[in-house]
Amino acid sequence: MLWPMSAHEPSLSFAPIGYVQCNRHLKFNARHQPDLESDETNYVVLNPGHQFELALEDLAGFDRVWLVSWFHTNVSWRPRALPPRGPAVRRGLFATRSPHRPNPIGLTCVTLKSIDKLTLTVGPLDLIDGTPILDIKPYLATVDSFPGSSMGWVDEVEASYAQPPRFQIELTEKAQFHLAWLRTEWGIDFTERAFALLRHDPTPHRTRRILRLSSGQYRMACGPWRLFFHVREETILIDSVGKGYSDESLQTEGSERIQDRDAQIAFALLPL
């Protein structure tokens, strides 16, 4: 549950001013921070009828803006979070950027490319399609940037990720077939995100959704899909792809809301 309000605390209400439009529909595919090296284009579309056209005046002169968002798919939080990067060590929530918070408010700094009426074209972001936007603020380099500041435990993690990835990825013929079929037949490709995580650290980790099975094989949850792999010294061998839902659950009432449902039903008919 979200943070409960007591009788002595004021009740707060928010209304989205607009929504994110992008090609990421799964939380798994959204990076934990915007990929500053990417040239991707995304959009923030504001709601009509609120004079937001006037509110956007003079914003076009700024290179970057802050997006204040609401993590609408999150319904719970814990006081200690398990960050996706680094060792499997829980940290105090307020020392992390976890989206699972008492009030699931997000803060993302994005490049502002252009403004056309109620549509803001922006650069890389770490949000998924349909994320509600609560506010937009200009980024001010003179007051929003402190490059010499210590980042606590994150400094050590950043240093480790600055090194070349330790592991290399290899695929069996079966895995190649599965991934090619998903990409060509359904336009589904989660490998960029999955492989980037695995190359740095394939060890079991709850937030990275990596589990070691009793057989010695590993399984990584990639949204509604699964990657099965082995680790051999510094090589990760991707054995196969699997679906995250059983045949029965894909046929039950309400299953049409499952992401990639039709692709998973077709996947079950592929030859082993």
Image: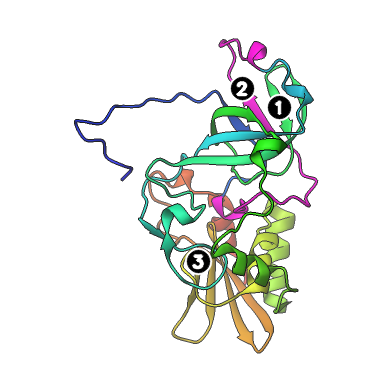
* N-terminal label among 3 and 1: 1
Q: Residue furthest bottom?
A: 233
Q: Residue furthest left?
A: 7
Query: Which residue carries the number 1 mark?
Result: 120
Mark 1 nearby-residue class (10 Å; few <14, some 14–19, many ≥20): some
Q: Residue at x 68, y 75 (%)?
A: 174
* N-terminal label among 2 and 1: 2
The secondary structure type at the circle numbered 3 is loop
Q: CA distance from mark 2 to mark 1?
A: 8 Å
Residue 209: mark in rendering: 3
Query: Which residue carries the number 2 mark?
Result: 46
Mark 3 nearby-residue class (10 Å; few <14, some 14–19, many ≥20): some
| Residue type for callout 3 | Arg
Q: Is residue 230 left or right of residue 14?
A: right
The secondary structure type at the circle numbered 2 is strand
Residue 160 on the magenta segment: no
